[in-house]
Image (tube, rainbow, N blue to C red):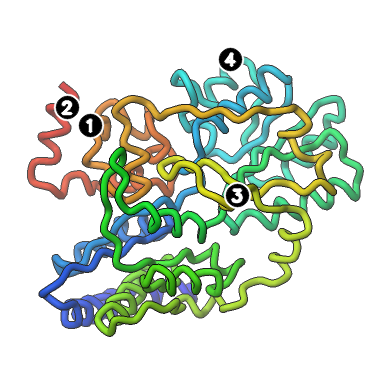
Amino acid sequence: MKFVDEFRNGDLAKRLAASITREADTGRAYHVMEFCGGHTHAIFRYGVQDLMPANVQFVHGPGCPVCVLPIGRIDNAIELAERHGATVCTYGDMMRVPASERRSLIKAKAAGADIRMVYSIRDAMRIAREEPQREVVFFAIGFETTTPPTAVAVRDAQAEGLRNFSVFCNHVLTPPAIQSIMQTPDVREHGTVAIDGFLGPAHVSAVIGSRPYEPFAAEYKRPVVIAGFEPLDVMQATLMVIRQLNEQRHEVENEYVRVVTREGNLKAQALVAEVFELRESFEWRGLGEVPSSALRIKDAYSEFDAEKRFALGTRKVRDAKSCECPSILRGAKKPTDCKLFGTVCTPESPIGSCMVSSEGACAAYWTYGRFRQSGDGTQRHKEAAA
């Protein structure tokens, strides 16, 4: 398949690996954070880390919108269904994310709440049309990639007069999150993380372009290379980061030129600007309160804002005891550093959000067996289980 098969070529991977080994200065270490969960899974699935020299390490960032959503917002969604009697529509991976008291949307559904899995916001609008007697709420999450479809749906719902439809908005923004990681590199509660450069988000950048990362790269003197999701994309982008570091440059470069431009998708950006505005602050799991890092629905479309329609309050809920998701999302710890990983926390019975989402770091470690890499890793987890 064009733009897929050629980016999984084994011979090219070997050549890229040789170039990285040759150009990586043996006198220093390179810590490259991949922000996107899609990059994390590509690294694990194709063994990209195994092709790197020992001094080139990937740091797994908070690039999964399901993983970074705070527990209180999931409690809000359950409240919409149980207390307000709304039909809550959401994506499949949100159904199993742990909420307070070991609850989740799927457990609330099993207890009788009307919570439905949908493939898109259009499915939620269809349900609202077919069941006009019900209040239908779409649980909207995602980075800039999924925000334009939500904007179109809200605008269309207003034009159509679909009054029993609303959106619980949890769209968050990537550049402020990256900035937050750099502003607080040493947080006692979550640990310290060294980051020399970033692999920039792929699909996000297709919408917003590469321009928004330029002030960040200049201020924090860290190179950012926008990378596609195939293994050769990740390897080429890593080589570009290494070259920048060797040359003491800190620029925004675009490896994913077949999709991403500097300006991004201007039409999508205009739609988002029409419907949404910045929140002053928003809580991220693992990062805490991050200023100007999320969106809310503008007053012109407020009748479709579920937070206003149902007067939802803000709740702050701590993660489960011993769960290391906050530290893992910051890149300060690896999944194998968590005592719960692979014992009481598995994809079948997740404790933390990093194990639920298909893009979560814990799920990637589990799916591709990375926890078996360390010599004593398997034994350590057996002992923890006992």
Residue at the top extreme, as displayed: 111
Query: Mark 4 highlights which residue?
Result: 111
Tag 1, which secondary structure? Answer: loop
In front of the other: 49 or 219: 219
Query: Mark 2 highlights which residue?
Result: 384
Q: What crowding class fits label 4: few (fewer than 14 Cα within 10 Å), some (14-19), or many (20 or more)?
A: few
* Location of residue 152 by image quarter: bottom right
Of marks 4 and 1, the one in the foreground: 1
| Disc 3 from disc 1: Cα separation | 32 Å
Q: What crowding class fits label 2: few (fewer than 14 Cα within 10 Å), some (14-19), or many (20 or more)?
A: some
Ranked by sequence position, the earlier of labels 4 and 1 is 4
Q: What crowding class fits label 1: few (fewer than 14 Cα within 10 Å), some (14-19), or many (20 or more)?
A: some
Q: Give coordinates of residue 200: x percent, y percent.
A: 44, 66
Residue at 75% across, 27% down: 310
Mark number displayed over residue 294: 3
Is 48 displayed left or right of 95 in the figure? left
Ranked by sequence position, the earlier of labels 3 and 2 is 3
The C terminus: image quadrant: top left
Query: In the image, what residue type sits under mark 1?
Result: Lys
Tag 4, which secondary structure? Answer: loop
Label 1 close to label 2 by CB (< 8 Å): yes
Mark number displayed over residue 339: 1
Q: Give coordinates of residue 264: x percent, y percent.
A: 61, 73
Q: What crowding class fits label 3: few (fewer than 14 Cα within 10 Å), some (14-19), or many (20 or more)?
A: many
Of marks 2 and 4, the one in the foreground: 2
Tag 3, which secondary structure? Answer: loop
